[in-house]
Amino acid sequence: MRSNRWFRAYQASVQVVVLGSLLAGCTEMQQIAGEAARLSGQPGLATSFQKGATMAQQAGSALLPIGEEEERSLGASLALQVVTRYGGIYEHRELTRYVNLVGQVVALTCNRANLDYHFAILNHDSINAFATPAGYVFITRGMLQHLQNEAELAAVLGHEIAHISEKHILTILQREKQIAGITEVGLTYVNQNPALFKGLIDAVAKKLLDEGLDQGKELEADRLGVVFAARVGYEPTAYRTLLQRLRAVKGDDRAFFKTHPNFSTRLTEVEGVLSTQQLKSTGVLLPERFLHSLQGRL
């Protein structure tokens, strides 16, 4: 009974901290998508976006080695690790709402649009963003301060959404479960083995936050982040511009490259997806709306 209370309190703390972010309504998300499509001169994008979102929601998610209920438990616990490690949640209602509006629209273009996505800002100066399974996405204050427009924000959030949609972190969880000899991490298991559950979460958090994902997964997230944002109508080259600017800022940052491929490799991947996907320039950057949303809030 005691371990049951511990687990429920653990999850409740995540819900209070992370899910307290104000989520956008469906109408508002459609408005953002529609405006981006209109400004791009491609009004048909709005209709395509809505059809794609409906198809994704109807399709549901594929069978997972880790079930969705289990994914939610593990994802929430990992999210709390991220929040704890990176200074807690940055509490600003309107700014959080804005990040959610952009993130929710981009998430509807991925192949796991049926998940409930939650976006929050971390109170940390580092230039970074994170995702954990089941739809938890975080961006640091430091990253927001280095962005110049909404299209860049959409691409960064798209990168993190790709980690979730392509189940990148779930592969780490599955591997660690096999090492620990764990079959399924449901509530019954947690009640019986709270120490092993904590050990599993700690091991995955170390891999995710200290060692980073496989470079192939990071590059795939770069490619898909560009595609997801472009599907809404944002300027496809925005992410390339951001990576170029970050390369100038961070230079040969070995700490950063410990968890990410170098910028030259990432830029090559982005150039490749712009070419192979034939993503045409829309010019939709929305710098004024982005800067207005951040003004005086960071």
Image: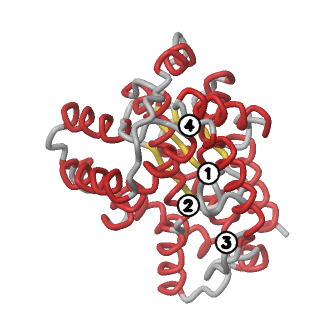
User: Which is nearer the eye, 86 or 112?
Assistant: 112
x and y, in percent, of residue 60 in the image:
73, 69
Task: Name the residue carrying label 4.
Answer: 42
Q: Quadrant of residue 101 in the image?
A: top right
Task: Name the residue carrying label 1.
Answer: 136
User: Which is nearer the eye, 74 or 114?
Assistant: 114
Q: Is residue 119 left or right of residue 68?
A: left
| Distance in Å between CA atoms under marks 1 and 2 | 8 Å
Q: Residue furthest left?
A: 252
| Distance in Å between CA atoms under marks 2 and 3 | 25 Å
Q: Residue at x 21, y 55 (%)?
A: 265
x and y, in percent, of residue 142 in the image:
40, 30
User: Amino acid type of disc 4?
Assistant: Gln
Q: Of the two numbered discs 3 and 4 on the same chain, state the one appearing first in sequence.
A: 4
Q: Which mark is residue 164?
A: 2
Task: Name the residue carrying label 3.
Answer: 194
Q: Is residue 165 above or below residue 275?
A: below
Q: Of the two numbered discs 4 and 1 on the same chain, state the one appearing first in sequence.
A: 4
**Circle 1/circle 2 CB separation < 8 Å:** no
Camera sees residue 266: yes
Q: Quadrant of residue 47 in the image?
A: top right
Which SS class for mark 3? Answer: helix
x and y, in percent, of residue 244 in the image:
24, 37
Which SS class for mark 1? Answer: strand
